[in-house]
Image: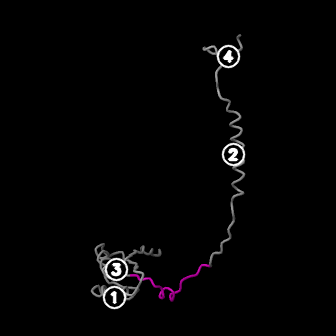
Amino acid sequence: MAGMDVGTGGGFKKEPNVVPMIDILLVLLIIFMMQIPLQRKVMTVQVPPQQEATQEQIQESTQIVMELRDDGSYAINNQVVPKAALDVKLHEIYDNRPAKLMFIKVGGSRKYQDVIEAMDIARGAGVQVIGITPPEEKAAS
């Protein structure tokens, strides 16, 4: 018989018929694709209006910011403090505070050693967490 593919072994080739399996997978894919939009849930959220901080609110803040100014002076919450009195002033502030958190704001011309010394003084006064504020960007003239 010329039209029949018998093969060299004299028997028929065994190949799985994958067409029905592909059809089933396509149907399942369509069903799952239709389920995704039905599973979405809408939540209504009310966002409070944005408030601009006034100077009074900034002054009433409980955050302590130590500034290492460009002129070589030190300030705690905009109050100038000599370097020799930093330890006493920080003990005065942090001895009765439960949250021992302080931010350091460094001027652009201060040395790294000045920052490390200020951090050591703060650690000695009991400050547990020290954050460094990023430098302020100057407005282009």
> From the viewer's perspective, is 38 left or right of 109?
right
**Sequence-first disc among 1 and 2:** 2
Q: Residues within 10 Å of mark 3 (few under 14, many from 20)?
A: few
- Depth check, mark 1 against mark 2: the one in front is 2
Secondary structure beneath disc 1?
helix
**Sequence-first disc among 1 and 4:** 4
Q: Are marks 3 and 1 in contact (CB under 8 Å)?
A: no
Q: Where 117 sits versus 60, above or below?
A: above
**Sequence-first disc among 2 and 4:** 4
The residues bearing labels 2 and 4 have C-alpha atoms spaced at a distance of: 36 Å
The residues bearing labels 3 and 1 have C-alpha atoms spaced at a distance of: 21 Å
- Depth check, mark 3 against mark 2: the one in front is 2
Region rendered in magenta = 49-65
**What residue does disc 1 label?**
89
Q: Amino acid at mark 3?
A: Asp
**What residue does disc 2 label?**
29
The residues bearing labels 3 and 2 have C-alpha atoms spaced at a distance of: 65 Å
**What residue does disc 4 label?**
5
**What residue does disc 3 label?**
70
**Sequence-first disc among 3 and 2:** 2
